[in-house]
Each structure stands twice: as C-alpha cells, then as structure tokens.
Image: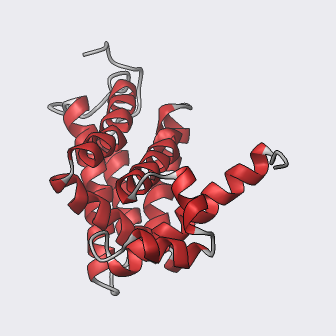
Amino acid sequence: MPKVSAAYLAARRRQILDAAAACFARDGFHRTSMQDIVRESGISAGLVYRYFAGKDDVIAAIVGEWHDQRQIFATGGVDERVAAYLDYLRSVGDPESAARLRLGVQIWAEAVRNPRIRELSRRNVDDPRAAVAAVLRTLPLAPGLDPDALARVLIAVYQGLLVQTVWDDGVDNAAYVGTVEALLGALIRSGPPSAPR
C-alpha cells in the first residue's frame, strides 16, 4: 500500500471534523451518530475510525481546536489584545458563524455532562482568562477592579453575546460591541501602569 502524505492525512482529518461539526450544529451531540458523521464526510467508516475511536474523540478534537483559536488573546500588547477581543465579539454577528455558535452552545451543554469535555472546555476559559488577567494587572484600572474578576467578566460578555445571538436573530451586534468598547475605555484609564497586584 503506497504511503500517503502528511498533508493528505491532515486534509482527511479536517474533512471528518468539518462533517462532524456540521452534524453536531444541526442535530446536537446526542442525535448525531458516528454513521451520520461518516455519511456527511463522504469518507469510509473504516477510515473515519482510523482517525477517531468514537464520537467523544471527535468532540474532544473540536473542543481542542477551539482552544487553539483562543490563543489570539495570549500575545501582543494591550491595544492588540483589545482589538482581537472586539473582533472576536464582532465575529459572533457574522451570519456565516451561525453553525459555529450553535456548536459552541452544544459544547457548553456537553461539558456539564462529560468530564473530558468539561476539562477541555475549562482550558478554553482558563487559559485566555489567565492571559488577559496578567495584562490587566499591568494597567491603570479604575479603582476597585480585580484583574482576574474583570477577565472573567470579559469572557462572560462573549459567552452571553453568543447565547443571545443563537436565541435571538434581532441582536444588534454592532451596538453590543460598541458598548463593550466604550466600557473598556472607561475601565482602563490612561496613564502610567500601576504596580502589579
């Protein structure tokens, strides 16, 4: 049997994960079977099972990729991180994100039931929270603001927007993001950085 390239293997894996994400967003985790993923991907069942032992492995791979995407908040200066955060909020309003948003809600629900998915999902919150809190500690924040708590609030702002957008087609994303931008401007005062807390 001829050897296949790493690019080919990566493309097949991507094809399976994209098919699974489409199934999960459409039908939910519990109504989607591995056979549904096989059918959606157009790849043989044997090949799908060479990549993933079962549905939980597929879900874990998708959640892991989400973690990698959230690393955008771990680097750059304050202005770059604020811009990346606001762009992330804006992406929630993109009509092409609808399936991704539904999948996100599904993942959060699955994290309540499945310890493996909860652990992976917690990384998707804990790592960006720690990175953002570290930056906030170097800034002249308004009095009384705890950097770690503020980082959690910023994550909750994203989570809340995502849930509201999934439930309500009338959410004004531009107004929401503009308000968040104004709030950030009020919370982060200009001036020399304060001593680390």
The image shows residue 75, relative to residue 124, as above or below, that is above
Q: Quadrant of residue 110?
A: bottom left
The image shows residue 43, relative to residue 13, as above or below, that is below
- Kindly tell me whether residue 93 is visible in this rendering: no
Residue 22 place in picture, x, y as percent: 48, 74
Classify residue 44 as left or right of residue 124: right
Residue 185 place in picture, x, y as percent: 37, 47
Q: Specify the quadrant that holds the C terminus.
A: top left
- Kindly tell me whether residue 140 is visible in this rendering: yes
Q: Quadrant of residue 133?
A: top left
Residue extending farthest front: 1
Number of numbered discs overlaid on the protein picture: 0
Residue 108 place in picture, x, y as percent: 25, 58
Report the residue at 41% width, 33% height from top.
Answer: 190
Residue extending farthest bottom: 170
Residue 81 or residue 127, whichever sits in front: 127
Residue 98 place in picture, x, y as percent: 44, 77
Classify residue 50 as left or right of residue 134: right
Report the residue at 29% width, 66% height from top.
Answer: 105
Report the residue at 85% width, 48% height from top.
Answer: 2
The image shows residue 197, relative to residue 151, as above or below, that is above
Residue extending farthest top: 195
Snapshot colouring: secondary structure
Q: Quadrant of residue 140?
A: top left
